[in-house]
Amino acid sequence: AKTDSEEYDGSSWTNGGSLSQKRYGLGGAGILTAGMAIGGDSGPPGGGNITTVENYGGTSWTSGTAIPTATSRLMAGGTQTAAIIAGGYGPPSGTNTSFNWNGSSWTANPNIVTARYNGLGGGGPTSQSSMVIAGGSTGSIVSNVESWNGTSWATAPSLGTARNQHGNGQHGNNSTEQVFVAGGVPPPTGISTTEEWSPETTALNVKTLTQS
């Protein structure tokens, strides 16, 4: 686990401020000048799941309000004042909990449908009222997708390829803009395919996933 952070300006990466708490498997929310590092695992060596939250102001990290339950490998999105987290690793298994952050406190949401960890959390960084979680692991790698509308979680079309530990891109709100997933780790090797979440396209509120 490390304390390093890096910043991207559209063309290159530079060193950012160091976290106070070393960690891996953390959740992230916000933007370059107002970001969040949420939970994670403080090892190896040693370590274990933590509740620690840190906020980034563009140059340095400061302590934030801890999440209710120590969790790593969680899915997260939103902003520094309106974030959402879902799932994660307990241990010894995936969790189904979800929480909202309103800028001053964490409150419980309804549980996600499928407990999981190492999935994608997409749909921010503009809002906590709309989010997609996709793939991950329940102990086995899954393709399940769920959508959050600000009130409840609902199942959505599955990924074409089950995957976990995958990268993601997100832009805006999942109900109006797009989210994509890239790569991942189905054993025994990683994959290079990407998939895209398409926003609402009909009066029937149908959403689809396409693979490239």
Image (spheres, rainbow, N blue to C red):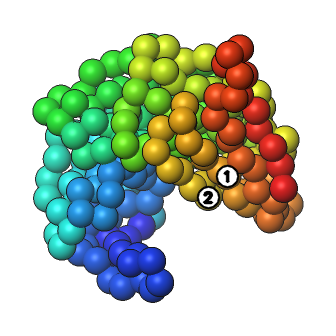
Pointer 2 and pointer 1: residues touching (CB < 8 Å)?
A: yes
Say what amino acid the circle numbered 2 marks: Gly
Give the left or right position of residue 12, taking residue 3 as reference. Answer: right
Which residue occupies 80% across, 53% down?
Answer: 186
Residue 146 at x, y percent in the picture:
62, 26
Residue 158 at x, y percent in the picture:
77, 31
Residue 160 at x, y percent in the picture:
84, 41
* Near-viewer residue (166 or 126): 126
Circle 1 packing at 10 Å, graded few (<14), some (14-19), many (20+), is: many
- Which badge, 2 or 1, comes first in the chain's sequence? 2
Q: Which residue is mark 2?
A: 167
* Near-viewer residue (38 or 153): 153
Which residue occupies 76% across, 32% down?
Answer: 208
Which residue occupies 37% across, 60% down?
Answer: 23
Give the left or right position of residue 62, taking residue 26 as reference. Answer: left
Q: What is the CA distance from the residue labelled 2 to the residue labelled 1?
A: 6 Å
Q: Which quadrant holds residue 135?
A: top right
Q: Which residue is mark 1?
A: 181
Return the mark for residue 100.
none
User: Can residue 147 be spotted in the picture?
Assistant: yes
Give the answer, above or below, for where 58 lies relative to 64. below
